[in-house]
Image (tube, rainbow, N blue to C red):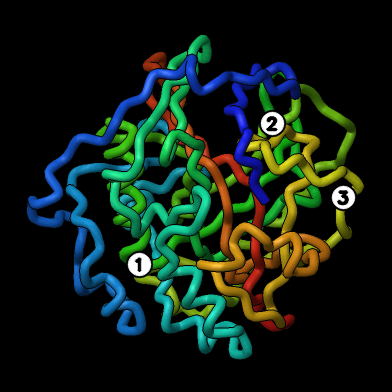
Amino acid sequence: MDDPNDTIGSSDEESNDIQPVFLEDLETYKTQYDPKAKCGVSDPELQDPMLADSYDGLPILPSGREILPIYDPTSRSVEYSPSSVIKGGRVKFSHWSTHIRKMLASNSLGSVIFERGEPRYINPSRVSPMILSRQTVPGNSGTQCLQIDGRVAVCVSALFCTESKLVSPAKIGGKVERMRKWISGIFHNQEWERFESLICLVFGERVLRAQLTPKKALSFQPMISPADNGTEQTSDSLFESAAPMDMFKPIILTSSPSPSKPKGLPSSSIPARSKTLLAYNDFVPVYDARKKVVDFNLDIDAFDKKLPMFAGEVPFGSFVVVGYTCSTYLSTLSGSNERVPHLGCNILWVVVCGTPPRK
């Protein structure tokens, strides 16, 4: 799935063209921290009983770092809820057995405890920050990318899918309407706290803003389209659903779900393996691992050869594994004129390990 001769793509927001930036032109920053200090994020109360032993020996990470929603806390956005932003829900791993009863345990467990795979795959919730660095992309407003061994790192995280718009993109507002596609999901308990600490640490920030919903679902997306392409907007707000209440710690579910409308696979071609940033029109491959055992340590660079494609949108409540790259950029905070660091999670692929039964 990767080509060793890849370059890092920098993009203009008004264009789908990806301009090559060569490694020799980049400025590298190594992570600075004390690996012998007391771990500030390890919390036995957050650790699921099925995963507790897997945290023994993981790298120490500092506390005091946060990833927050892009919404201004003083705004009156209907999407903003102060209480839920402060204490969002996280997924309890052991409760997948009641939510999706026939999911392959080796796939779900293997994806969560996965740490690192060749040539550049990492689980940001479990690797050491000492093996990572960030590089500044020149001429791109302070954009930095996450790297390992001099190459763009491909992050791998297991999530509870809250929404998918990879097949049926949605319109976003503003002076010029654009089309956006994405998949959003919630991390597992303790995995989020480690992810949050490591990402902020490596990028040298105590606070990063991200496409994070009030219920703590993080969005992963390719570039946004430069203009409206005529696709109708859909409103599949599937977060409020009949998922088990005790699967989250804690979570607030209030509304009824809207039905999903799978529309089949897009006609776009599969992007080149060398890409680490997908354009809007690039095909985002979604693989189906519901009936086939995969080894995330051995197969992670060959999903396109080992797994069939998943047809349609990924349903709410699915167990998904997302492959993505991380970058930071400076942008104005919603509701103010302050330019602050934002985290971008640039989707490359998705693996569906399980889908909930249809009601």
Kind of residue indicated by mark 1: Asn
Q: Along the horizontal axis of the image, is 10 left or right of 196?
A: right
**Location of residue 324 in the rendering, given as x and y in whole percent from the top left corner:** 56, 47
**Residue drawn at the location 37% of the way across and 41% of the way down:** 68
Residue nearer the viewer, 145 or 47: 145
The residue beneath circle 2 is 224
Q: Could you tell which of marks 2 and 3 lies nearer the N-terminus?
A: 2
Residue farthest along the top direction in this orientation: 139
Q: Give the numbered dot on residue 189.
A: 1
**Residue drawn at the location 44% of the way across and 61% of the way down:** 187
The residue beneath circle 3 is 266
Q: Are marks 2 and 3 in contact (CB under 8 Å)?
A: no
Q: Give the numbered dot on residue 163.
A: none
Residue 242 quadrant: bottom right
Marks counted in the figure total 3
Q: Could you tell which of marks 1 and 2 lies nearer the N-terminus?
A: 1
**Location of residue 106 in the rendering, given as x and y in whole percent from the top left corner:** 53, 82
Q: Could you tell which of marks 3 and 1 lies nearer the N-terminus?
A: 1
Packing grade of label 3 (10 A; few <14, some 14-19, many >=20) is: some
